Image (tube, grey):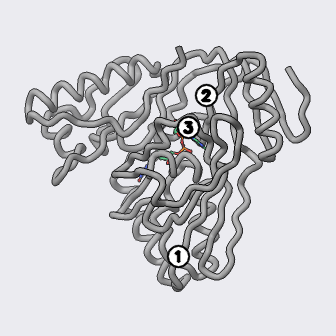
């Protein structure tokens, strides 16, 4: 493999600690980049050598297979957050919690909801993450992406199709590099009160002590996926090491040695049961990564 400044490469790397389901997966290469220039050099090399690659955020919304014959790229060093008045610019490798904390510290309001999302800003833009009736695109103004020809371009919010937990970025081979938000003047004390209350509620209702990737299905219009799954009698239902959480039915947890097939089979089973019982075709919120 190549030697590029600001880029570290591990061969036959374990991904177990890089996905929140803690699936025991490996890849030919794990490449951590510190700069956009380093990222571009890496991509040029991988394209020349015909090596497949996958951009990994915090791995908190994905189900990955056992082996990836290719390179996993982590934007480890791209995590700078800059705040000027009410404008916040954040590199895509930053964690949502860091972004949220930085804005609260600056007495800005609008991103408190993001504090408990265990993902990166890049992954959260691509999936339009959200909570408590707020979402990324509420305060987002523009993003910078690296397109398939390795050109950096700026996209305004209006240029990006987005919906509940979805954007057209999911279907494009672009890498989100940076995002700019405009927030409102807030008050640190009230923001801290708000997040404390929500943190407590999450702790009481979600299985945060077990590996998962958050909500499995999107909530259908006017209902909750968790309610439908629970009403189908599936709480605690298990396939291999994957279990429908006893605490929150829209979470699947890894009880220790779950494989991606256990999780995928359980998702299929839950989907079929809810469809048969309620006629509701639940849509997957998590992403099954096809590395073939
Ligand atoms: C306990 C728990 C609670 C959660 N609660 C919520 C919640 O309340 N609301 C919510 O919306 N989600 C929630 N999630 C799910 C998850 O945290 C979010 O979906 C998050 O936005 C995913 O970000 P990530 O960096 O982990 O993305 P990953 O899972 O790493 O990747 C997701 C997709 O984005 C792509 N991607 C990642 N970074 C980039 C980039 N820079 N450029 C282009 N593509 C990229 C990946 O290739 C992949 O296709 C929760 C998860 C857990 C484990």
Q: Is residue 136 above or below residue 58?
A: below
Question: Of residues 198 and 33, which is closer to you in this image?
Answer: 33
Q: Residue at coordinates 71% horizontally, 55% vertically from top-left?
A: 79
Judged from the image, the secondary structure of the residue bearing numbered disc 3 is loop
N-terminal of the two: label 1 or label 2?
A: 2
Q: Which mark is residue 183?
A: 1
Queried on whether the Cβ of the residue with tag 3 lies below 8 angstroms from ligand 1, the answer reads: yes
Question: Of residues 210 and 165, which is closer to you in this image?
Answer: 165
| Mark 2 nearby-residue class (10 Å; few <14, some 14–19, many ≥20) | some
Queried on whether the Cβ of the residue with tag 2 lies below 8 angstroms from ligand 1, the answer reads: no
What x and y, as percent, mark residue 6?
Answer: 87, 41
What x and y, as percent, mark residue 55?
Answer: 62, 35
Judged from the image, the secondary structure of the residue bearing numbered disc 2 is helix
Residue assigned mark 2? 16
Q: Residue at coordinates 31% horizontally, 33% vertically from top-left?
A: 244
Q: Which mark is residue 59?
A: 3
Q: Is residue 59 above or below residue 256?
A: below
N-terminal of the two: label 1 or label 3?
A: 3
Q: CA distance from mark 1 to mark 3?
A: 27 Å
- Using the rendered view, name the quadrant where residue 144 is placed: bottom right
Residue 110 as seen in the image, left or right of residue 226: right
Q: Nearer the viewer, mark 2 or mark 3?
A: 3
């Amino acid at each position: 493999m190549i030697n590029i400044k600001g880029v570290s490469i591990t061969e036959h790397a374990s991904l177990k600690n890089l996905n929140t389901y803690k699936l025991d997966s490996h890849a030919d290469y794990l490449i951590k980049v510190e700069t956009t220039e380093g990222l571009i050099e890496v991509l040029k090399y991988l394209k020349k050598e015909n090596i497949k690659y996958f951009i990994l955020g915090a791995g908190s919304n994905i189900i990955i297979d056992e082996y990836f014959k290719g390179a996993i790229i982590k934007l480890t060093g791209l995590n700078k957050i800059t705040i000027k008045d009410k404008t916040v610019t954040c590199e895509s490798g930053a964690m949502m919690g860091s972004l949220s904390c930085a804005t609260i510290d600056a007495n800005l309001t609008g991103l408190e909801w993001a504090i408990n999302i265990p993902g990166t800003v890049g992954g959260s833009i691509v999936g339009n993450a959200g909570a408590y009736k707020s979402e990324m695109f509420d305060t987002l103004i523009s993003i910078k992406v690296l397109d398939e020809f390795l050109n950096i371009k700026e996209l305004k919010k209006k240029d990006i199709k987005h919906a509940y937990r979805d954007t057209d970025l999911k279907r494009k081979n672009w890498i989100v590099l940076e995002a700019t938000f405009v927030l409102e003047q807030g008050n640190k004390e009230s923001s801290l009160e708000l997040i404390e209350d929500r943190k407590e509620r999450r702790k009481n209702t979600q299985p945060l002590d077990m590996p998962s990737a958050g909500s499995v299905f999107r909530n259908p219009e006017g209902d909750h996926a968790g309610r439908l799954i629970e009403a189908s009698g599936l709480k605690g239902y298990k396939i291999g090491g994957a279990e429908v959480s006893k605490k929150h039915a829209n979470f699947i947890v890894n009880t220790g040695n779950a494989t991606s097939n256990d999780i995928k089979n359980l998702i299929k089973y839950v989907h079929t049961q809810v469809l048969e019982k309620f006629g509701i075709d639940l849509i997957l919120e998590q992403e099954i990564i096809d590395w073939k």
